[in-house]
């Protein structure tokens, strides 16, 4: 039984509308009564050795590890809204080892160094786990692994190929047939699965960010919220400090780490490489004991289906199911607006897909609906660089897999700012850039055609049309 993207008729519409009625229009992770109080904005003039722009995972990891490398470094972190307000508080909480957006993408783009990239990614996840323990961060970190499930035969063939590729690199994923995968999680849609038991952890992403925030403060990082940076300017030389202008202050810093994702790129060069894509998520009410028994899922793996337009889902600590993905919506001109965080037609479609996957949960209601922006680039994995004579470093383009990879990116930024070669800075992945996206209106037209083509491929046994093959040949793509 394959998931179909089409909604049923009026009866189905009423059924899914009822399931969505009463849902709070905000991210579940941020809707917690013990969320930390906001820190005051920066006012007046300030100085720092290192200024970090962005209060998501990338910025928090950069600030914390800068202090771990050298506790004497004076670090200031500025965030335009609240810590974890953007992608870091709106994602699914899949903390993956992969820093290349999956093994397949890494093999295609960085095949010559994929063994090193896999090693560094696994090391990065181990170090995240150790950091969570060292600082006592209560974020429900569970090393459950992640399971890709096939709902069509062609998808299972892809899982077999992925298993072979992983084993060739010394990894040991578990390939499951229909009976085996349904023993793990009870869904009539499943035809097979591939379970990576070590390469992913499930976390509460907001609590991870809030825990990193606390660790930063305890280490002496000065954090200012509601402090959007409007410009970065340099003096006439190539060795002097940079000046960050905000609405109420100026911050002068010897070095700057830019970790703002898709939000208003402060470097003109980044605008060609980044596309803000909206992703949407549902959260259910907590399942009862009998409902949990009906779906199994005792190993609590994160799950993603193997289609081009895919869903991702996982259990929370209180046995809710987070269900997101499928739609990846781009708005003309790289538009980002709060009004786009809610998209009822997508929520209804996601609800239809949810109940097709778990028909035994008919009658369950959703408690939260939300959307958020993914900083997408054409190679799907992060890219890096410097500006202002090496005094500024940036990392962006994680394409939805940044919960874990942002820590690796933070280390890369600190390496680049230090100006000393490391095993990270010598990687092709770090030294190269993705292909840029074209300007409007070609950008919107190309993304729209790509989305249509991916949907057609899913309905056509995975066969890619001429447009997708042309994108493959030049290294451009699109992913949710």
Image (spheres, grey):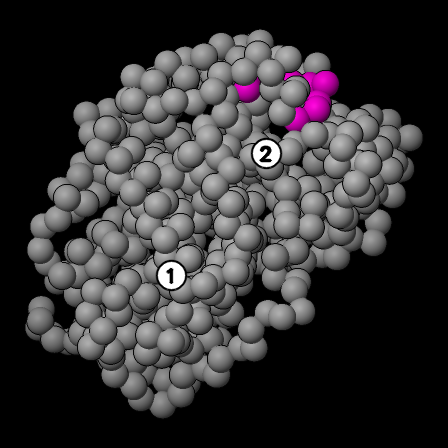
In what quadrant of the picture does the N terminus appear?
Answer: top right
Q: Which mark is residue 200?
A: none
Residue located 64% across and 33% down the image: 298
50 vs 235, left or right, is right
Give the side of residue 355 with respect to residue 300, left or right: right
Residue at the spot x=32%, y=78% of the render? 220
- Front residue of 319 and 94: 319
Is residue 209 found left or right of 350 in the rendered image? left
Question: Badge 1: few (under 14), some or many (20 or more) residues near its Cα, within 10 Å?
Answer: few
Magenta region: 185-193
In the image, residue 54 above or below residue 377: below
**Residue 137 horizontal/vertical position (percent):** 47, 62
Magenta segment includes 346: no
Q: Please indicate, yes or no, whether residue 200 appears anywhere in the rendered image.
A: yes
Please tell me whether mark 1 sits on a helix, a strand or a loop.
Answer: helix
- Whether tag 1 and tag 2 are in contact, CB under 8 A, the answer is no
Q: At 62% from the left edge and 13% from the top edge, which residue is drawn? A: 178
Q: Dominant secondary structure of the magenta stretch?
A: loop
- What residue do we see at 77% from left, 30% from top? 294
Quick check: 439 above or below 270? Answer: above
Q: Which mark is residue 134?
A: 1
Alpha-carbon span between mark 1 and mark 2: 25 Å
Locate residue 452: give its quadrant: top right
Q: Position of residue 88 (x, y in %)?
A: 49, 55
At numbered mark 2, what does the secondary structure look like: helix, strand or loop? Answer: loop
Q: Position of residue 176 (x, y in %)?
A: 54, 16
Q: Earlier in the sequence, mark 1 or mark 2?
A: 1
**Residue 186: in magenta span:** yes
Number of marks in the rendered image: 2
Residue identifier under label 2: 299
Q: Position of residue 108 (x, y in %)?
A: 30, 23
Q: Is residue 114 above or below residue 240?
A: above
């Amino acid at each position: 039984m394959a998931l179909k993207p089409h909604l049923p008729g009026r009866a189905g519409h009423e059924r899914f509308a009822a399931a969505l009625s009463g849902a709070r229009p905000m991210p579940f992770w941020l809707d917690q009564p013990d969320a930390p109080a906001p820190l005051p904005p920066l006012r007046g003039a300030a100085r720092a050795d290192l200024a970090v722009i962005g209060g998501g995972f990338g910025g928090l990891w950069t600030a914390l590890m800068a202090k771990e490398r050298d506790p004497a470094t004076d670090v200031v972190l500025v965030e335009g809204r609240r810590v974890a307000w953007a992608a870091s508080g709106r994602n699914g909480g899949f903390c993956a080892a992969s820093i290349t957006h999956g093994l397949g993408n890494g093999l295609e783009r960085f095949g010559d160094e994929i063994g090193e990239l896999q090693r560094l990614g696994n090391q990065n996840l181990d170090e995240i786990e150790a950091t969570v323990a060292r600082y006592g961060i209560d974020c429900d970190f569970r090393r459950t692994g992640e399971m890709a499930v096939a709902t069509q035969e062609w998808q299972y063939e892809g899982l077999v190929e992925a298993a072979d590729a992983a084993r060739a690199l010394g990894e040991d994923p578990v390939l499951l047939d229909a009976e085996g995968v349904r023993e793990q999680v009870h869904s009539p849609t499943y035809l097979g699965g591939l379970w990576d038991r070590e390469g992913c952890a499930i976390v509460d992403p907001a609590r991870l960010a809030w825990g990193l925030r606390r660790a930063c403060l305890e280490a002496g990082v000065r954090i200012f919220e509601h402090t959007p940076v409007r410009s970065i300017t340099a003096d006439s030389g190539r060795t002097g400090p940079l000046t960050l202008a905000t609405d109420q202050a100026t911050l002068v810093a010897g070095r700057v780490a830019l970790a703002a994702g898709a939000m208003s790129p402060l470097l003109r060069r980044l605008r060609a490489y980044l596309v803000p894509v909206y992703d949407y998520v549902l959260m259910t009410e907590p399942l009862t004991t009998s409902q949990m028994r009906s779906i199994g899922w005792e190993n609590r793996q994160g799950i993603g289906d193997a289609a081009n337009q895919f869903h991702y889902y996982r259990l929370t600590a209180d046995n809710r199911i987070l269900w997101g993905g499928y739609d990846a919506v781009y708005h003309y001109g790289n538009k980002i607006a709060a009004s786009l965080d809610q998209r009822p037609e997508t929520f209804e479609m996601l609800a239809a897909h949810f109940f097709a996957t778990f028909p035994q949960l008919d009658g369950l209601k959703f408690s939260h609906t939300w959307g958020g922006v993914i900083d997408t680039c054409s190679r799907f994995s992060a890219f890096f660089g410097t500006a202002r004579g090496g005094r500024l470093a940036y990392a962006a383009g994680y394409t939805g897999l940044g919960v874990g990879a942002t820590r690796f990116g933070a280390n890369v930024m600190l390496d680049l700012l230090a100006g000393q070669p490391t095993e990270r800075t010598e990687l092709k992945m770090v030294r190269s850039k993705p292909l840029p996206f074209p300007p409007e209106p070609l950008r919107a037209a190309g993304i729209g055609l790509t989305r249509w083509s991916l949907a057609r491929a899913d309905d056509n046994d995975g066969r890619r049309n001429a447009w997708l093959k042309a994108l493959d040949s030049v290294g451009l793509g699109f992913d949710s």
